[in-house]
Image (cartoon, rainbow, N blue to C red):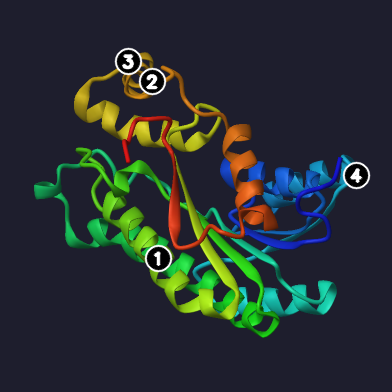
């Protein structure tokens, strides 16, 4: 059986998190050489060690995806080591506890804009700097992760929803400019995945405001889906592999709905 990403060079930002780690493992399993980054080195190194022990190719580095120089220098080192960059995957997140659970009319301006500026800056920097390298080869895939908050009204999420909408708009605009140069830009929009820490981080501040229990929160999310269950990290990562592969060559300028029916297109 052929590997879908054989010999592809992939850089993953936020690789120490649940989503970034799952995608990194899936990419490596399909033959990609993965270069993993994160603001904190230990969790990134743990993912790289898992990949190497399974026979894959992975290197870990400490990179703050909000630091333009750090991202640029890391990409230069990847080019020096591997010769090119084929895939840039941004799974960078910020802690939700300070931005969720507060009504908009009670939220201060700085707290509201924190997720918008952080998510937009990280995605813009990583995409732009990767694209500059990819354009020379007239080939490459730029990817990120958003959430259903981008398309539907949800209370007590502050600037998080607008931040995800910004990322999806940027995906469309990057594609419009880069597709003529042979690049694809595609996003993934999963709903809460129980294995990821982010679902609990999203629940806890809102629990205080609503009185909802953890079980009630999960039941609420499940009730919105068509199969009455939530997506797994493996299911999301499998879609990421396909999108990053040459088999998805007809796909660009879009965000794939992985909310299992919670958000109808």
Q: Earlier in the sequence, mark 1 or mark 3?
A: 1
What residue lies at 53% left-to-right and 71% top-to-bottom? 127
Q: Is residue 62 above or below residue 191?
A: below
Work out how far the residue at label 1 is from the one at label 2, CA to CA, in angstroms: 29 Å
Name the spot of residue 177 as percent of width and height, x first.
Answer: 45, 78
Name the spot of residue 162 as percent of width and height, x first.
Answer: 27, 55
For mark 1, what is the residue?
A: 172
Q: CB atoms at circles 4 and 1 under 8 Å apart?
A: no
What residue lies at 41% left-to-right and 35% top-to-bottom? 259
Work out how far the residue at label 2 is from the one at label 3, CA to CA, in angstroms: 10 Å
Q: Earlier in the sequence, mark 3 or mark 4?
A: 4
Q: Residues within 10 Å of mark 1 (few under 14, many from 20)?
A: some
Q: Quadrant of the N terminus?
A: top right
Name the secondary structure under disc 3.
helix
Name the secondary structure under disc 1.
helix
For mark 2, what is the residue?
A: 222
Q: In the drawing, what numbered circle is on residue 55?
A: 4
Q: Earlier in the sequence, mark 1 or mark 2?
A: 1
- Relative depth, front residue between 257 and 72: 257
In the rendered structure, the answer to whether residue 193 lies left or right of residue 27 reads: left
Q: Earlier in the sequence, mark 2 or mark 3?
A: 3
Image label count: 4
Name the secondary structure under disc 2.
helix
Say if residue 99 shows up in the picture. Answer: no
Q: Earlier in the sequence, mark 4 or mark 2?
A: 4
For mark 3, what is the residue?
A: 216
């Amino acid at each position: 059986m052929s590997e879908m990403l054989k010999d592809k060079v992939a850089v993953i930002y936020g690789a120490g998190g649940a989503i970034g780690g799952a995608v990194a493992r899936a990419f490596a399993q399909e033959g990609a050489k993965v270069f993993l980054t994160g603001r904190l080195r230990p969790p990134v190194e743990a993912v790289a060690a898992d990949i190497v022990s399974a026979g894959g190719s992975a290197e870990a580095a400490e990179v703050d995806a909000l630091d333009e120089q750090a991202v640029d220098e890391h990409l230069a080192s990847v080019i020096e080591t591997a010769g090119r960059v084929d895939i840039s995957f941004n799974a960078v997140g910020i802690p939700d506890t300070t931005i969720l659970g507060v009504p908009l009319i009670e939220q201060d301006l700085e707290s509201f804009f924190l997720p918008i500026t952080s998510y937009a800056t990280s995605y813009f920097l990583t995409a732009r700097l990767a694209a500059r390298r990819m354009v020379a080869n007239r080939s490459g895939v730029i990817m990120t992760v958003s959430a259903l908050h981008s398309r539907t009204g949800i209370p007590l999420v502050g600037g998080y929803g607008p931040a995800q909408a910004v990322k999806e708009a940027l995906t469309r605009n990057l594609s419009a400019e880069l597709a003529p140069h042979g690049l694809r830009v595609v996003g993934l929009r999963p709903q809460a995945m129980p294995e990821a820490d982010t679902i609990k981080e999203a629940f806890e501040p809102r629990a205080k405001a609503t009185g909802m229990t953890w079980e009630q929160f999960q039941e609420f999310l499940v009730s919105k889906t068509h199969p009455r269950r939530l997506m797994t990290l493996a299911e999301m990562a499998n879609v990421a592999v396909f999108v990053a592969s040459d088999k998805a060559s007809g796909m660009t300028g879009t965000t794939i709905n992985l909310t299992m029916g919670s958000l109808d297109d």
